[in-house]
Structures are given as C-alpha cells and as structure tokens.
Amino acid sequence: MVAEKLGWTIVDNEFVDRVAERVGLSPEEVAQREERVASLIERLANTLAVSSPELFLATSDISPKSNPSSDDIVRMTEAVIQEAADHGNVVLVGRGSQARLDQRDDALHVRIVAPHDDRVRSACKRLNVDAKEAERIVDARDHARKDYVRTHYQRDWNDAANYHIVVNSTLVTYEGAVDLIVDVAKKVCW
C-alpha cells in the first residue's frame, strides 16, 4: 500500500528468484535455506522484474555453483538489497534491509508491530488456518527473523532503535499507518 501510494516499486517475492538465479539454485531451495538461516526473503520482490528489471542487471562476485553456502546466499541477498536501494524509489520488505541499509540517508526504516494475539488472529484469517497453526507460523517467523538479524548483523530485531518509525497496527488502521509512513517518507526520502 505504501509503494502504491508513493508510486514506487515494491521489492517482494521476485527477490527469491533473483537470488536463486545468481547462486545457481531453484527458488524453492533458496527459500528453504533462507528460512533455515532466518527467512529474510519471506516477502521480497514479486513485481520487481516486471516494473523495474534494470534493478537486477548488475553482476556480483558470487558466481553460480552447485552448492552455495548459506553465507553465499546471504551475501547475494545483500547485493540484491543494495542494488534495489541504489535504484531508488523502492519499498523493500524484509527484516535484513534495515540493517543492511542502516547508513543510508535516503532510507526510511519502518517496523509494523502488534500484540501476539492480534497477529495470530490475523494469521488465521490471512492464511486460512486454525489458531494453533497460526501461532506456530507467527512464532517460527518471529524466531527466524530475530535469528537472521542477530546472526548476520549482530543486532536485536526487536530493538526499536533499528527503525525510524515503529507503528502498532492495533492502534491505527492499515490506511492510517500507510498515511503516516508515506508522509514521513516524502519528508525524508525526497
């Protein structure tokens, strides 16, 4: 919603495909390994290839090989994040981005939070699963994100100091959160 309102590109699931192509694995293998390491690429780059294919034309020092390590996949993930950010006018969805791009003056780091029970209820509806399965998914994703940021960036994923804005989605509507983020993005990123 933020990307749409700003007229920017959102980097979503297509990201998995680009990393996979660069390291010589299938998208499923990359997603599986990233989830094991910490699931950075859970939600990055679905529409990117269509709207801005030039983001991924640059080469990397990681060449495809038969069995790239988790570190290779992390380095390629960082390269793709950097290329997308260098292109500009993009919304990157992923918990590693705030750490990878922490020194950029033109980046706005946002975290959306909500109480655990609210997130479980939302996951039940969004994923069409029962409460027990939704809680398992929410907890596993939280754990993976926390581990990824701690392992690769030596940071606490929950530390509000890693973000410019932390929005509690139970206190404002999604539309209200979008308006807040867009307003700040216009002031910071332009």
Image (spheres, rainbow, N blue to C red):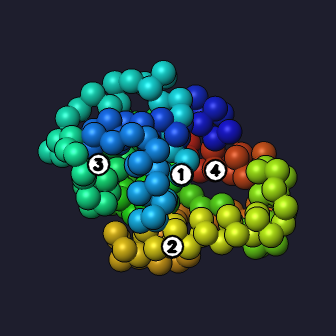
> Image check: 66 left or right of 117?
left
- List x then y, in percent, for residue 81: 37, 46
Could you say which quadrant of the image residue 71 lies in? bottom left
- Residue under numbered circle 3: 76
Q: Could you tell me the amino acid type at mark 1?
A: Glu
- Residue under numbered circle 4: 181
- Residue under numbered circle 1: 42
Asked which secondary structure carries label 4, the reply is helix
* Other residues around mark 1 within 10 Å, as few (<14) / some (14–19) / many (≥20): many
- Residue under numbered circle 2: 146
Mark 4 vs mark 2: which is more N-terminal? 2
- CA separation in Å, label 3 and label 1: 15 Å
Could you say which quadrant of the image residue 117 lies in? bottom right
Relative to the observer, which residue lies in front, 35 or 174?
35
Relative to the observer, which residue lies in front, 143 or 185?
143
Mark 3 vs mark 4: which is more N-terminal? 3
- List x then y, in percent, for residue 38: 46, 65
